[in-house]
Amino acid sequence: MARAVTTRTKAINTAVAWTVALVIFFPILYTLITSLKTEAEAIAGFDLIPSFTFESYVAVQTQNDYFKPFMNSVILALGSTLLALIVAIPAAWAMAFSPTKRTKDILMWMLSTKMMPAVAVLVPIYLIFLRTGLMDTRIGLTVMLMLINLPIVIWMLYTYFREIPGEILEAARMDGASLWNEILYILTPMAVPGIASTMLLNIILAWNESFWTIQLTTTNAAPLTAFIASFSSPQGLFWAKLSAASTLAIAPILIMGWFSQKQLVRGLTFGAVK
Amino acid sequence: MGNITLRNVRKAFGNVVIIPDINLDIEDGEFVVFVGPSGCGKSTLLRLIAGLEDTTSGTISIDGRDVTGEAPAKRKLAMVFQSYALYPHMTVAKNIAFPLKMAGEDKATIERKVADAARVLNLTDYLERRPGQLSGGQRQRVAIGRAIVRQPSAFLFDEPLSNLDAALRGTMRLEISELHFQLKTTMIYVTHDQIEAMTMADKIVVLNAGNIEQVGSPMELYNAPRNLFVAGFIGSPKMNLIDGPPAEKFGAHTVGFRPEHIAISTTEGTWKGTVGVAEHLGSDTFLHVHTDDLGTVNVRASGEMKINHGDTVWLTPDPARIYRFDAAGLAI
């Protein structure tokens, strides 16, 4: 039986939804507002109307170059995602299409690594990076970010590939397709939406990763997360500048996320509902 | 040509033996139906012929050529799957064209053959649609179209109608039979539905637990089932199988009477009973009669019968149509 929704309940639901959304979004909004204030205004107290000055942005750019950490973030996010896909696609493929008795165990084991707090392995990883000369290098950090997100990437791709019915691949084989043609004409086109969603999510995860990027970099490989952090500690409490730096750091990924939200939502809920 | 020969074919998954040892000859142009209950190995047998599963031992040959170790693509067979297995990202035209493209045919030939197949299957108006925009019956036709364009030496159907509703199933059954008359190509059809088997087949292969119970034309299986399994499986409603003292009177361990071979009377007959459920279909009347001697007996009478729940009736079997089986379940 369909539930009757009155105009009143609809209005209440809308109001509640907007309130929840605003509460969740408020920290980001307040960061943006603070970044448009002078330092004096920022410290003065809670005020939603800024003086719309861009002096903090100018100060941030002159004090610390924005471009370099931005490029580092781009390289780390894209590089680690690409590397993760190269490893994860064949892995997920194998597990989805020729599973063995232990496939489920392997998947659980991979996921279990995400349950461990990162700080638990900080010292060994820090030492490895230090001894092998990977400290503060883009290569080292790219590999690190790839490894920490790999379980999620494999899981997501595995779920996607599992959704491709085996009979379709068999039909292609019956239709005379060679292994290569099967991959080219059937598998890849069917898997592209899944691979794209996985890629987007991983870029966001890598972009926002702040524990390892801050611990394992100083200047050369430091991405935007380290850029924000550099405004909080040594300079004291410069709220406006810190907010300006944060806004600059999250803006690119927010914009990307906004444009790809349809893909992302599909990626996150895939397999949950049929 | 499409002669298919199976010699001592065995299939096991690890320790689980699905098909112990099968020998079978399928003649060119025959419509062969593999029928049996769920898990009897009929789909596995079809997949072995297709090359989608490897045989554990034995040989499969097509037109005298041993194809046991060959990839499915090289066997020149076409298959229609239960789920249709259409390529969701391609239009109907591209789906049908796919096997031709894989065979390296030129564009003009592909277009002509796709148009021909679409005309035969009434799909011309849907060529630019995607599978997702089609109904179940149309999808099934696309799957058949994809199979016929390549002119394979045999068609393999794996329960192709089980996802359709009853009415559509009837129509598609006719269409597939028509197609067989037109193309005269070997067809192997797997189903658990004995009505499909009886109506479509030239030759029925009854399978049970990976073994062939009997091979023969529909009427051979109906009139002369070799054992209890075939007797109980072929025919609808099921044959009444009775054992014990009543059977001994007929000189058998078990006797069978088909529901349509029992006469009903309200006045006299061999066995007396009370009607449990009476199903009036107009064309037929199915009665479930609780008898004192034989337990519940299913009876089928043609046309309408004014007999209802609780009525007392007398049943008389047709003496020429009594099936007798020995203790091992084999026909006497």
Image: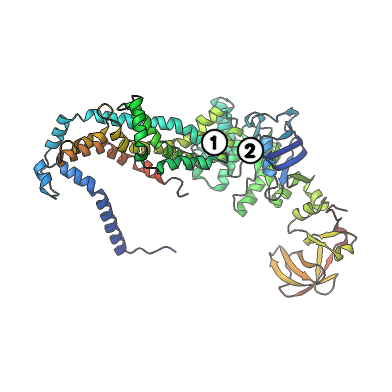
Relative vertical location of residue A200 with respect to residue A220 in this rendering, above or below: below
Q: Label 2: state its secondary structure.
A: strand
Instruction: Report the side of B251 relative to A111 (left or right).
Output: right
Residue A167 percent location from the top left of the image: 58, 40
Residue B95's disc number: 1
Q: Residues within 10 Å of mark 2 (few under 14, many from 20)?
A: many
For the N terminus of chain B, give its image quadrant: top right
Q: Nearer the viewer, residue A78 or A183?
A: A78
Q: Residue at x 27, y 54 (%)?
A: A18
Would you say residue A38 is visible in this rendering?
no
Q: Residues within 10 Å of mark 1 (few under 14, many from 20)?
A: many
Q: Amino acid at mark 1?
A: Asn
- Judging by the rendered image, the residue that carries numbered circle 2 is B79
Q: Label 1: state its secondary structure.
A: helix
Which is closer to the viewer, label 2 or label 1? 2
Residue B97 percent location from the top left of the image: 55, 32
Relative vertical location of residue B131 with respect to residue A19 in this rendering, above or below: above
Q: Chain of mark 1?
A: B
Q: In which quadrant of the rendered view does residue A195 lie?
A: top left
Mark 2 or mark 1: which comes first in sequence? 2
Q: Amino acid at mark 2?
A: Met
Residue B87 percent location from the top left of the image: 53, 38
Instruction: Report the side of B302 relative to A203 (left or right).
Output: right
Q: In which quadrant of the rendered view does residue A37 lie?
A: top left
Q: Nearer the viewer, residue B91 or B48?
A: B48
Q: Residue at x 50, y 39 (%)?
A: A106
Q: Chain of mark 2?
A: B
